[in-house]
Amino acid sequence: MKKIINGKVYDTDKARELGIDGGGDSFHSWSETLYQKRTGEFFLHGEGGPMTKYARSIGQNQWSGGEKIIPLDVEAARQWAEEHLDADDYEEIFGLPDEDAEPVALHMILPAQLAAAARQRAAEDGVALTRVVEMALTEYLK
């Protein structure tokens, strides 16, 4: 599925699939897949039957199954992963949680060439751009 939301493209064919969960039967059947774009952004692709949150109206009091893309910030993606994935899958995506540290959002301005190279490397390695910056800072601070 491909969708443009708030001027950003979300495409399940181009993003990396991180994890999937689902359940129910017949009209209650649903599935959600967590994806990460090459830019590091997360999103969910969800689909379900006519008695799920993914239902869509097809007439007066008539419902059908549907699908939707939902952009997620990092914290929402972590929360979804905690609730829907096992510990090994969570660790592979986000690393082990540091129980004493709260994440902090930083706004950074980098030279365009450096930012492009970092995005490309993150995409090649299949990790979030945030993780690349975290690894670089960790190495720098040793």
Image (tube, rainbow, N blue to C red):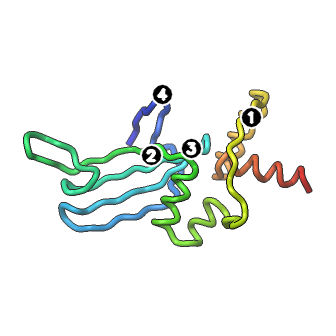
The numbered dot on residue 41 is: 3
At x 17%, y 42%, the residue is 57
Decide if residue 23 is on the left or right side of residue 49.
right
At x 59%, y 71%, the residue is 88
Decide if residue 76 is on the left or right side of residue 113.
left
Image quarter hosting the N terminus = top left
Q: Position of residue 98 (x, y in %)?
A: 71, 65
Which of disc 3 and disc 2 is earlier in sequence?
2
Do the residues under discs 2 and 3 have CB atoms within 8 angstroms? no
Q: Which residue is mark 2?
A: 12
Q: Which residue is mark 4?
A: 7
Q: Which residue is mark 1?
A: 108
Which of disc 4 and disc 2 is earlier in sequence?
4
Q: Residues within 10 Å of mark 2 (few under 14, many from 20)?
A: many
Q: Residue furthest right?
A: 142
Image quarter hosting the C terminus = bottom right
Mark 2 residue type:
Thr
Q: CA distance from mark 2 to mark 4?
A: 16 Å
Q: CA distance from mark 2 to mark 3?
A: 12 Å
